[in-house]
Image: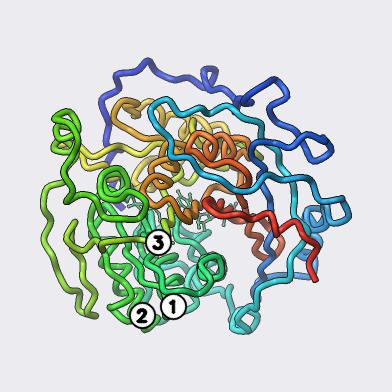
Amino acid sequence: MSSSTPTKLPNKNKRRSEKGRRPPQRVGSPAGHRDEKCDSVADLTILVHRVDLYDSGHTEDDYHHDGAACTASGHHTPPKVLPYGYEPCTETCDTAGTIAVTRVPTQPSLPTNPLWSQMPVADSQPNPFSPDIDKYWKQRRRLFSRFDDGIQLDDQGWYSVTPEQIADHVATRLVQFTSGKPIIVLDAFGGCGGNSIALAKHPNVKVIAIDIDRTKLRKAAHNASLYHIPPSRLVLMECNALFVLEHCYRHGQFVLDQPVATPEQAEVLMQAMPPPVASETTPAGYLIGGIDVLPPHIDVIFMDPPWGGVNYGVLGKNGYDLARDMRLPRPNNHNNGLDEGFFDTFQPSSVQGKKAQFLSNAEYWDDENSVHGAQLLALAARATAQLVAYDLPRNTHRLSIGQAALSAGYHGNILVEEHYLNGRVKTMTAYFGKDWSYFLEPSP
Ligand code: MGP
Ligand code: SAH
């Protein structure tokens, strides 16, 4: 692997130190965050739902790992929850509001593919790649059940692809939440295709997969062909997703071809407009293009952005704050926001070293020309005004999700799914844009 250093963005801000990093702030009154024992109804309730998935890698012990979370709140009287609502956020958006967090009773599992219990996930085949990816190589068939057919990944792909069972679950959820109707999903950070493929397995789903890196899109197209995804259901776009979310859609409708209201807005748009990119059809028949591949409307936005590298876990349980710990550079004339692989940099082995490395990301941030994880949600909400699904690190602080939701304009309730694989939490997906209070009803 190459030994290049990360792209340094001009830092107009003072250096951030670990000391300067604040924990998530409570919102509204000092009692802004309440739990389910309080009687008052919160402006926003986060419904937390644990999903358990298993494959042949599980042991009996796994079933009991963190088992308490499975049953939590099962016998509580359901808390009062306000119905879902959304007011598009403006410059002066009021982010204050009370946030409650409650676990929902365990739901019946969605049917799982018997493939997973039969397939030998782990084996002793040596890793032919760099030792950096040992941990991911061991889980390669968990990432893609068809790995052995010739799946292609790059460094960032290895550590960020969503394991297939989880990606399938999230895709099924999005189909359920849209009642199985034909939908167009914008996968804003498509990568090597884990989530896009899972979505496009559904005959009524068409996916527009965006990535800033064309080499990943080519891999995604190849990987999709191994799953026999028809090219009519997966179109790939090379672009900075922030441009598409900020300028191309409002309420799900394509607006880039509409006149802008003021000369200032026209100037902002001109500054952000990406240079044209070449179109190509991959050997398996998938189209990769630029803005011209965008459809006149989209129904759902799915987002699985970079989380800041492989060391996000050093922030500890609940230690990851969306507004503080995630940054995406806006496109501009000098830098399209393309990330260097984290494996290209020195990987410290001590926890302290990893923590220092993760926190040092902030030294490269240019706050004026970047968007943080909460602002990203607001952009997606405004672009679609419908369903938004947001894949997040398992240690994301719930309050930081609630604050992001309120500042994006959501109120009432949102759903956060924790995805457990063989009893260990792997990822979380937060869903916005619908009413999920029915999750509080006891399962039949
Ligand atoms: P992990 O914590 O690196 O792996 O990522 P694991 O196997 O849980 O390791 P352990 O050491 O804790 O046992 C877990 C999952 O999170 C990965 O399989 C990816 O799906 C996802 N993931 C990890 N990272 C670092 C990213 C990221 O930066 N962006 C996105 N979108 N997903 C990531
Ligand atoms: N869901 C994917 C993994 C996504 S990883 C899977 O399951 O395979 C995040 C991806 O976002 C990376 O491929 C990275 O190249 C891409 N990316 C980073 N910044 C971006 C931006 N501003 N716009 C679009 N893509 C971006």
What is the CA distance from the residue labelled 3 to the residue labelled 1? Answer: 17 Å
Residue 420 location in percent, x, y?
Answer: 66, 60
Quadrant location, the C terminus:
bottom right
Contact check, label 1 and label 2, Cβ < 8 Å: yes
Residue located beneath label 3 in the image = 299
Locate residue 309, reporting x and y percent: 44, 44
Give the quarter of the image for residue 211. bottom left
x, y percent for residue 5: 29, 38
Viewer-proximal residue, 311 or 114? 114
Residue placed under numbered mark 1 in the picture: 201
- Which residue is nearer to you in this view: 208 or 123? 208
Residue type pointed to by label 3 = Asp
Three-letter code, disc 1? Lys
Looking at the image, which is closer to me, 402 or 383? 383
Crowding around mark 3 (Cα neighbors within 10 Å: few <14, some 14 to 19, many 20+) is some
Task: Sort mark 2 into few (<14), some (14-19) or many (20+) by Cα contacts within 10 Å.
Answer: many
Tell me which label, 1 or 2, sits earlier in the chain.
Answer: 1
Residue for point 11% across, 53% down: 276
